[in-house]
Image: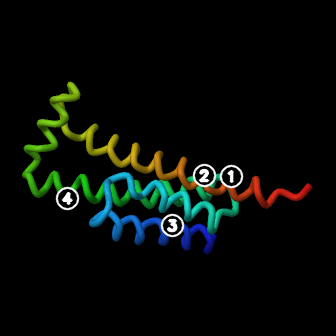
Amino acid sequence: MPVFLITLGFSFVVSVILADYLPWWSFVPVSFLAGLWQGRKHFYVFMSGFLALFFIWLGGASYFDTLSEGRMTTKVAHIFGLESKTPLLIITPLLGGFLAGISATTGFILKSIFLRKN
């Protein structure tokens, strides 16, 4: 379990720092490196990447929704044909978390391929 928390913390902290300087997708290589570096089991690697980005994007979406008093989020929800902004605030972090989880798992699988014993 401590490895899971280390990987989660690494992904979270580095992704938050890089988000100020790099494009929105900069969390993908961070999650990949976290999975490559600390990965032990598929499920934990995926969940560490998923949870780190889920909470980052949930916080970001909530922050920008509050900042714009819900106007921006409501307009984007209407563009996608949604009646309410709530599904958008749920789907956004789920997508970010899924991408980070897949990236971390890819790093873990690459590591396991090269460390496989014959």
From mark 3 to mark 1, how far is it between C-alphas?
17 Å
Determine the CA span between mark 1 and mark 2: 6 Å
Q: Quadrant of the N terminus?
A: bottom right
Question: SS of the residue at dot 4?
Answer: helix
Circles 3 and 4, Cβ within 8 Å, touching? The answer is no
Label pair 4/2, CB-CB below 8 angstroms? no
| Residue at image mark 4 | 63
Q: From the image, tell me which residue sits under label 1.
A: 109
Towards the viewer: 52 or 28: 28
Q: Within 10 Å of the Cα at label 4, are there few (<14), some (14-19), or many (20+) other Cα atoms? A: few
- At x 48%, y 62%, the residue is 30
Are the residues tagged 1 and 2 within 8 Å (C-beta)?
A: yes
Instruction: Name the amino acid, label 1.
Output: Ile
The residue nearer to you, when weighing 20 against 77, is: 20
Residue 5: x, y in percent?
A: 55, 71
Say whether disc 3 or disc 1 marks the residue closer to the N-terminus: 3
Q: Amino acid at mark 3?
A: Leu
Q: Residue at x 63, y 68 (%)?
A: 38
The vertical placement of 18 against 108, above or below, is below
* Residue 45 locus on image (x, y percent): 60, 58
- Dot 4 or dot 1: first in sequence order is 4
Residue position marked by numbered label 3 in the rendering: 8
Residue 55 image point, x, y percent: 37, 59
Pair 3/2: label in front: 2
- Name the residue beneath numbered marker 2: 105
Q: Is residue 53 left or right of residue 106?
A: left
Q: Secondary structure at mark 2?
A: helix
State if disc 1 and disc 4 touch (CB < 8 Å): no
Could you tell me how far apart the alpha carbons at marks 4 and 2 are, in whole angstroms? 29 Å
